Image: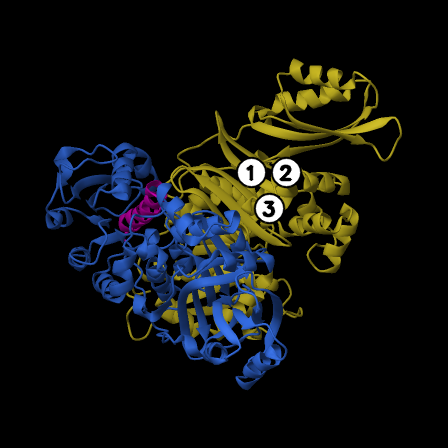
Chain colours: A yellow, B blue
Amino acid sequence: MTTTAHTQQPPVLKVGLLGAGTVGSQVAHVLLTRADELALRTGVQLQLSGIAVRDTAAPRDVALPAELLTTDADAVIDGADVVVELTGGIDPTRARVLRALNAGKSVITGNKALLAEHGRELQDAAAATGAQLSYEAAVAGAIPIVRPMRDSLAGDRVERFLGIMNGTTNFVLDQMDTTGAAFDAALAEAQELGYAEADPTADVAGHDAAAKTAVLASLAFHSSYTIDDVHCEGIRSVTAEDMAAAREAGYVIKLLSVGERCADGVNLRVGPVMIPREHVLGGVRGAYNAVFVTAAAAGSLMFYGQGAGGEPTASAVLGDLVSAARAIALGAQGIPLADYAALPAVSMDEVSTKLAVTLAVTDRLGVLAQLAQVFADHGVSISTMQQSEDPRTTGTSMLRLVTHTGRHADLMATVEALRGLPVVRDVVSVTPVETGE
Amino acid sequence: MTTTAHTQQPPVLKVGLLGAGTVGSQVAHVLLTRADELALRTGVQLQLSGIAVRDTAAPRDVALPAELLTTDADAVIDGADVVVELTGGIDPTRARVLRALNAGKSVITGNKALLAEHGRELQDAAAATGAQLSYEAAVAGAIPIVRPMRDSLAGDRVERFLGIMNGTTNFVLDQMDTTGAAFDAALAEAQELGYAEADPTADVAGHDAAAKTAVLASLAFHSSYTIDDVHCEGIRSVTAEDMAAAREAGYVIKLLSVGERCADGVNLRVGPVMIPREHVLGGVRGAYNAVFVTAAAAGSLMFYGQGAGGEPTASAVLGDLVSAARAIALGAQGIPLADYAALPAVSMDEVSTKLAVTLAVTDRLGVLAQLAQVFADHGVSISTMQQSEDPRTTGTSMLRLVTHTGRHADLMATVEALRGLPVVRDVVSVTPVETGE
């Protein structure tokens, strides 16, 4: 590699690709068909030098040159100047990414699971050799959020982010909200339309969003977090009744990724949350993703776009690749990401939240006084309360309460105490409320 | 400067600041009070080495050390490693920025007017010495849009952007929309609240948005545009009646910056446009800004946040400064921005648009047939039409038409022909419609 971007014959940068699935084959396609345009943008000729796949004869979305395909991933890494990893999974991917970084080769990856478990190890390996580790595609697909968080907000202080970072669950919840469908029906439709996998667990249980939350929080708060630091709840328990009640109150339920500074560190959580319908996040429909960031100086920012899909994700990978190529052409090393802040991940208990609680209660005089006493005993105050008949049983009322902001542990203890009251027949639902302010 | 980010004593990077107004004094304040944190982020010690001001004794938002203040801008530039330009205006700022770039010193600026007139000259000067020219603060204030456009979408192809890039006009239009106020009343309120200047011309006439449009389009389309390439209309002609009619039809009127590829190049325009209320841009309220980008692979993206204000804009400047410092610490040159695409700016005539037209017409039989004939003669078809009584005059109807998409010149010729019909008493308003799809 020479180090000028203005030679007549641009220097060649060999790109090794690991994986040729939906995203990988799209990346390969662009490298093979738009090489000249990319050379103008980067000052280097990006040459696809090898593609590691599990089965060279498998059918693919895009026809790829047979001579580039191999099952020998190490050979692809060793023959490349920069490596694009799109195989997914932890092993053997981790060893391969380390092999590249240890050799000083920059790596672009979309592997949120790997980053959410071994991010620190990979960052350290990159820093040791001056290689770059880029992963725009790992968080919120095509949306440029990793780079703005790392670079644009580098002179600011991120206080909190609220993210809708899983398209499958947003599609399901949006369907429930707009059609009144039950969870199972909405999920079945999402599967039929290709928005949900046959086994939707990773999405529906919040694991995918939790991995992204750990990756984004590590950048936002200059610390290292893993998926185990993220308190995680899925959306299976969200009912059509919850949705309808939220709608009536001017809210919508979203699977929200939250990372926020609190007294003793940072709290990271994923779960269904009621947000005001008129909040900009409330308007994120279908399979779209968005990340709402609050920073000390910049104030409120939101980044919105497609969170998944072959082409959108390939766009994010190519953006990283072009940046890495430019940096290599200009002789720059990667930016080492230090976790100098080392803010600990703190449990939910100490976090300030507010809850919407729906109770089925015996329909008789004095019930409200009993309930109010439980709240008072726990130092939790009630913001709004609404009573209606329980359509399911006679002699029972449905009570919808929203608390004021309080310590999460106190709020949950209140709910447990309510559950123990003889007049409370059922705690129908408990949903955190986020005003986004 | 040494080139490692991991020495015990970080190398010192001297920062020269030109201008100490609202944004400048905020930047100075952060550099003076948070130097250690910034050193951890960048690997270099950012040392404010001088502040050039017009009057060293003038009162300021933030107290600044007297020994750093000087009226000698050239001395500040010559004594610095990197220059932050926040004085605004074209002259003598242009010469100062060139002085820094010619000496190989990276420059961070928020000066959209300068970039929109002399951007190419400054880019060339930066490229010649390997200096960086950064200007995140010049477009949409705190919103990271310049960097995503330059880096994250570098492997993609931007087809179009729709931007709400002027907070003053968005505030005024939002007030008109929500309160039904007339333009003058809404502007007066904006002035009272500090959202509009005493002389609001630059905002209200669209000049500020047009400069930002030229800067953003140059990045998006890999070409060089000036403000003269932007077709520009202001919002003074938007009436309370236009607003009400738009609302009734499910639309809202925004001052929109549009950059889009068309057959022979790129069309750049700024003006009041009707957009669907449920579009994500329709939810951008108050003084907030947003840029909605459509790219070939990434699909739809939106960037949202505060477009102005001392602290938000300072956040963008500091993000640029931290990036420049990291790059310098790592021995990287700036990324030269080539306008290799050199797509010409094409006039409005050839652009495809659709128009909402309100006509006051004589209330008698056969009028609709006459109007329809004029549309047919110009090859323009009508999408929707609505007739109502004109509350202002008896014997007159108000006719609201929305055309199908057509060549802009044909649409405007149709309007002119309508104006010439004896039955048309007045062309009350003509507003482009943008569906955002």
Q: Which residue is mark 2?
A: A273
Res. B251 in view: yes
Q: Amino acid at mark 3?
A: Gly
Q: Secondary structure at mark 3?
A: helix
The answer as to whether the residues below labels 3 and 1 share one chain is yes
Q: Percent from the top left, x then y, of residue B361?
A: 54, 72
Q: Mark 2 — on which chain does it sit? A: A
Residue at position x 52%, y 65% from top?
B434
Res. A21 in view: no
Q: Secondary structure at mark 2?
A: strand
Point out the tag, 1 or 2, that comes first from the N-terminus.
1
Q: Mark 3 — on which chain does it sit? A: A
Instruction: Find the distance from the CA under tag 1 to the CA under tag 2.
Output: 10 Å
Point out the residue furthest to the front here: B394
Circle 1 or circle 2, nearest the eye: 2
Instruction: Find the distance from the CA under tag 2 to the CA under tag 3.
Output: 11 Å
Point out the tag, 2 or 3, that comes first from the N-terminus.
2
Circle 3 or circle 1, nearest the eye: 3
Q: Does the segment drawn in magenta span residue B237? A: no
The answer as to whether the residues below labels 1 and 2 share one chain is yes
Q: Percent from the top left, x then y, of residue B301?
A: 51, 57
Circle 2 or circle 3, nearest the eye: 3
Q: Which residue is mark 1?
A: A258
- The residue segment tinted magenta is B309-331
Q: Image height check: is A118 above or below A325?
A: above
Q: Which residue is mark 3?
A: A282
